Amino acid sequence: MSGSISEQTRSRRRSLKPLSRLVPFVMRYKSHVAAALFFLTLAGITTLTLPLAVRRMIDHGFNGEDGMFIANYFSMLVVIAAVLALASACRYYFVVTLGERVVADVRATVFAHVTELSPSFFDRSQSGEIISRLAADTTQIKSAVGATASVALRNIILGFGAVAMMVVTSPKLSGLVLAAIPIIVLPLMAFGRSVRAKSRLAQDTLAEATAYASEQIGAIRTLQSFTNENLVTSRFAKAVEAAFEAARGSVLARALLTFVAIFTVFGSVVAVLWFGSHDVLNGTLSAGTLGQFLLYSVFAAGALGALSEVWGELSQAAGAAERLAELLDERPEISAPAVPVALPEPARGEISFNNVAFAYPMRQHRSAVRDLNFEIKPGETVAIVGPSGAGKTTVFALLQRFYDPDSGSIQIDGIDIRSTDPHKLRSRTATVPQDVTVFAASIRENIAFGRPDASEADVIAAAKAARVDEFAERLPEGYDTIVGERGVTLSGGQRQRLAIARAILRNAPILLLDEATSALDAESEQLVQKALEGLMGGRTTLVIAHRLATVLKADRILVMDDGQIVEQGTHAALVKKNGIYARLARLQFDEAFERAAE
């Protein structure tokens, strides 16, 4: 992930205020914000009335002339306590609810944005780190927007109010306190920058550890098959230890920040008390006024001390917000033009590659395909064969516009696919990949992924056409059986039949089959091949295949090598040429090749 964002961009972002990116999310709930601010202000004002009551009691309540005076003041203090308790409870409810709501929106927005990013982004990013940002970083922000923001705002209101009342109570003593503020604030600012940098490092390090764990857990069977448990646990332990050391550095910086803040703040309070006590002895200040001023100074000091701790937490949240902002700032390399061209209706399924050249972004030095030229007529079935690395799968990726060619053009039904909406384009294709994706859901839900609005009858019909019913109906819960993460409870052939059923249900005009029957046994292959033949009828079909059954039935075969089409024709014509196709046929189909040649 770190490689996906330039250092120049990262440096620029460090100079910004990442938490400001949360403001649009917060302002969606203005009523909650208003209620939270009202109760925060009410709690602050109520707290600030306490020193006034204390002064009146000290100066007037202990002279013995009016015994009811103290009783009245204590009654008033009970009322103040009730108002403070109610305001604090409402403040907590509105602020924490707002934090939960904002973080839910942030998570949804970031995830929705990530799903729109181009495959090239995921080529250079670790999925585990993306998940870490969605989970750990948003949790950090939830704490900041919720409890931390509440504490910060409360102490800001209390701090400013206390300082104002200090000035009203005794301008002289207030001057001494205000003179000490730069001594307190400057270290806070310096340590705050350090805390933010260390927090960012801690979050990045933890994300790397999470990404590694996610990758290994996803491949747990391979891990255990090669008995690499000790190797993997050792590497993860080192990653966790690195994350711990980074976190400890962040905690140490925050601890030092707290020490400096609290010591300097309360040191200034002691100094003020010393000067004030001399004024009381000289008769220029009443004891009650000194007590009032002292309480306000304690409020101000406590608020500033609390803000020093809050500053550290906000710095951590700023680091998390910065990491999420990096995801939100990623722009899809594949997007719809400002005015997309509509694809013709009804779809014909005509495909044309014109002088197409392309190299993957992570391998710019080597072209995946070059000088690629071919046309496929509506309803035609074309097989693409060739050795590994010849560029066959790249053709599918380009056709679905997961990448744009470096040069040349690709057209569907006469429309350049770069001029239309990628979603509309992809809705016209159904894919059965060699590496099948099965979700941790039921068999029914996995098939319905091909067309989520499909009826129950359509899902079952697709399942039967792909021979999924043969194993699904034998399971205890039938089509509602949960297949486990990545379909781990199913065999390779069963997973592939699920993918075929998904493609059948999608009912798209262009069908892309990438070794669609490679994981099936001979009997299942024969059954599914019949289903595929029914599916292929009336559709334009591209088949990446090495299996002779599929190649023989193709209208045309394109032979690729080193990113180019080097031969094309029917099976019989290519065999007679005795070129690359004939060599591959001898290697892969031996006896069948002999029979076809006769």
Image (cartoon, rainbow, N blue to C red):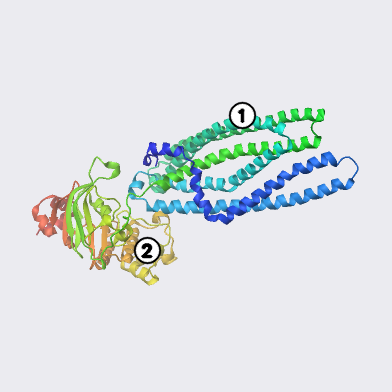
Which quadrant of the rendered structure holds the N terminus?
top left
Q: In screen coordinates, is 466 left or right of 557?
A: right
Q: Say which of 316 and 154 sits in front.
A: 154
The residue that label 1 is drawn on is 183
Residue 317's label in the rendered image is none
Q: Is residue 51 visible?
A: yes
Please report the residue visible at 71 percent of the width from the left and 34 percent of the height from the top: 171
Q: Is mark 1 on a helix, strand or loop?
A: helix
Q: In screen coordinates, is 70 left or right of 386?
A: right
The residue that label 2 is drawn on is 447
Q: Say which of 160 and 564 sits in front.
A: 160
x and y percentages locating residue 115 in the rendered image = 39, 53
x and y percentages locating residue 241 in the rendered image = 49, 35
Name the amino acid, label 1: Ile
Query: Callout 1: 10 Å neighbours few (<14), some, many (20+)?
Result: some
Using the rendered view, name the quadrant where residue 54 is placed.
Answer: top right
Q: Residue lying at the far right in this picture: please name it.
A: 65
Query: Callout 2: 10 Å neighbours few (<14), some, many (20+)?
Result: many
Q: How far apart are marks 1 and 2 (CA)?
A: 67 Å
Which quadrant of the rendered structure holds the C terminus?
bottom left
x and y percentages locating residue 567 in the rendered image = 13, 52
Which comes before the other along the chain, label 1 or label 2? 1
Indicate which label's residue lies in the foreground, 1 or 2.
1
x and y percentages locating residue 547 in the rendered image = 21, 57
Q: In screen coordinates, is 517 left or right of 477?
A: left
Q: Is mark 2 on a helix, strand or loop?
A: helix
Q: Say which of 542 and 471 sits in front.
A: 542
| Marker count (numbered) | 2
Q: Say which of 380 and 342 sits in front.
A: 342
